[in-house]
Image (tube, helix red, strand yellow):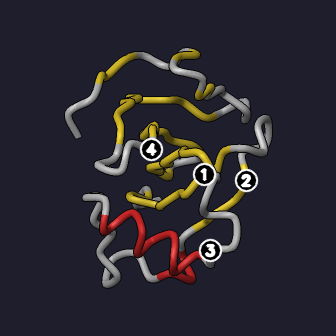
Amino acid sequence: MTGTSQQPSESNGIEEENVWDDSSSFAVQEDCLPDGRSFQAEMWGEAGFTFLTYRFPVQGLEQYSKSQVVDYLETQGIPIDPEKFPVDRIQLLPNHKNSDLLELTLTIGESDD
């Protein structure tokens, strides 16, 4: 991704926030996909787990299944390895504050505890 990297804040209309008391945002990057769709990638952690969440506008993807959204992101240059991230382990939800956004979350690390 070649976009801007920043500390967590509100920027470019995509707001992220610390929803859970023990979660921490490590890095946030914003960019545009080749088709012009804006997106935000946030690496964050909670309770010994590390997550990567992509936030992007839902427009045009309303009827897509989780698998179709993953395929779309891959065609736009965001590879999601099916060996590491099977579709049944990927979380795809509307953004809790803005229903015009989707959030796709991958669990990328677990504590050894």
Q: Position of residue 48 (x, y in %)?
A: 51, 49
Residue 90 in picture, x, y percent from top left: 54, 70
Residue under pointer 3 = 64
Q: Amino acid at mark 2?
A: Pro
Point out the tag, 2 or 3, that comes first from the N-terminus.
3
In front: label 2 or label 3: 3
Label 3 crowd bin: few (<14), some (14–19), many (20+), radius 10 Å = few
C-alpha span from label 3 to label 4:
16 Å
Identify which amino acid the numbered label 4 is placed on: Arg
Disc with the residue nearer the chain's start (2 vs 1): 2
Q: Secondary structure at mark 4?
A: loop
**In 3D space, how far apart are the residues under numbered discs 2 and 1 (Cα atoms)?**
6 Å
Residue at image mark 2: 94
Identify residue for label 1.
103
> Disc number at residue 74?
none
The answer to which of 62 and 85 lies nearer the viewer is 62
* Rendered residue at 42%/68% (across/down): 72
